[in-house]
Amino acid sequence: MLRKGDLMFYRDYGKTGVKVSILGFGCMRLPEYEKDAKHYMDEDKCIELLQTAYINGINYYDTAPYYCHSNSEYIVGKALKPYRNKVFISTKCPCGDELQKPSDYRKQLEQSLKKLDTDYIDFYHFWSLNKGIYDNKVLKLGLLKEARKAKEEGLIKHISFSFHDKPEYIKYIIDTAEIMETMLVQYNLLDRSCEEMIAYAASKGLGVAAMGPVGGGRLAAPTDLYAKLTGKPSIATYELAFKFVLGNPNINCALSGMQDLDMLHKNLNTVKSEAVLNQEEWEQISQALDQLKKFSDLYCTGCGYCQPCPAEINIPHIFNLFTYHNVYGLTGHAKNEFMRYLEKGKTIKDCEGCGYCESKCPQKLKIRRELARVEKVLTSI
């Protein structure tokens, strides 16, 4: 349910019992400066930025131990200290080499509590889960039990996870870890791969926050995409990006990594009530996106059946860059990314002509011919 505050709209965060602002503050790009080869937070700018966000109704702040050269938690805690009982702080438990035994979970939690200068964390995430990490760390080390214990002691209010893997593993995690209460996942106009699992998470009562609503900046570039999708006058693509993400009824909060006051106010203006799509408009745009892709002159679904290529050509990635140009009008981004790929990646010149990719393609694409064409287009635009 969408509820209006004085300056912001709020949604129920799954069944957690709390309401979060539809715009959340991602705290991984806060203002920093470098001195003597070391990085420091620009404390005055950071505090002004974070407190201005609070004054304008943002109540959800997402940080992590290693953000901003490991300084983000400290400055978030300091800036939000005056409002601690009025905001929700989200941070994360690293799930790499830091976790070797069950007690390491508590160690990581206590380090974050100390840096944030708080007695509790509202949403504590198992950080960047994939199936391998979930099986070999979370389950094998019994960390769900450790999380439950920390919650019972009041150190954690809600147990969460952030996700980076094949969408179907979201269901696996939710079904086998029934204590999960919220999920943080990549979702935007260009990456809708987790859409079905987002709906599944919501149906199970989990709150869902979207990271990357503007596609890591890709959707900040102006295009005529909105006009192409709706037949209506063009709007800024970043505005369409937020419209789309927040138009999904299963998304409760869209995180944006904001670096300065201009970006903050731009986002605040974007998420006003008139910027959020209703259900009918969201479904219209969803269908239009599918049609745009379908009728592209290169309809690669990104299924990956053509992989692994014997010549190590990343075919889905190259074709996806062409889609950015051909379908979404993100030509500058497509070209820049392709030129970066050329520095290290393999292309049609490396093709061994074996035809493996074409024999596996469900769309029956003439992949070798299309790779040559796409390379020519992306290097000449």
Image (spheres, rainbow, N blue to C red):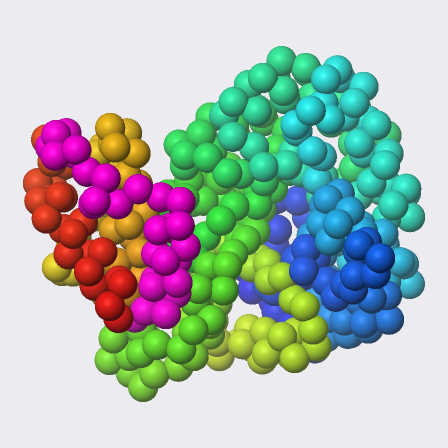
**Relative to 202, residue 375 above or below:** below
Residue 314's quadrant in the figure? top left
Q: Position of residue 16 (x, y in %)?
A: 66, 44
**Relative to 366, residue 140 above or below:** above
Q: Is residue 278 left or right of residue 300?
A: right
User: Could you tell me which residue is drawn at 8 percent across and 40 percent down?
Assistant: 364
User: Could you tell me which residue is drawn at 25 percent across and 75 percent down?
Assistant: 228
Q: Nearer the viewer, residue 24 or 174?
A: 24
Q: Is residue 268 visible?
A: no
Q: Position of residue 214 (x, y in %)?
A: 48, 63
Q: Position of residue 346 (x, y in %)?
A: 30, 42
| Residue numbers of the magenta segment | 328-357
User: Could you tell me which residue is drawn at 82 percent across and 40 percent down?
Assistant: 112
Q: Position of residue 297 (x, y in %)?
A: 12, 59
Q: Nearer the viewer, residue 16 or 260?
A: 260
Residue projecting furthest to the bottom: 233
- Residue 344 among magenta residues: yes
Q: Is residue 67 left or right of residue 22?
A: right
**Relative to 118, residue 353 above or below:** above
Residue 11's quadrant in the figure? bottom right
Q: Nearer the viewer, residue 69 or 127?
A: 69
Q: Is residue 23 visible?
A: yes
Q: Is residue 272 left or right of residue 171?
A: right
Decide whether the magenta segment is chiefly helix, strand or loop: helix
- Residue 258 among magenta residues: no
**Relative to 110, residue 280 above or below:** below
Q: Nearer the viewer, residue 312 or 128?
A: 312
User: Could you tell me which residue is drawn at 82 percent across and 66 percent down?
Assistant: 42
Q: Quadrant of the N terminus?
A: bottom right
Q: Quadrant of the C terminus?
A: bottom left
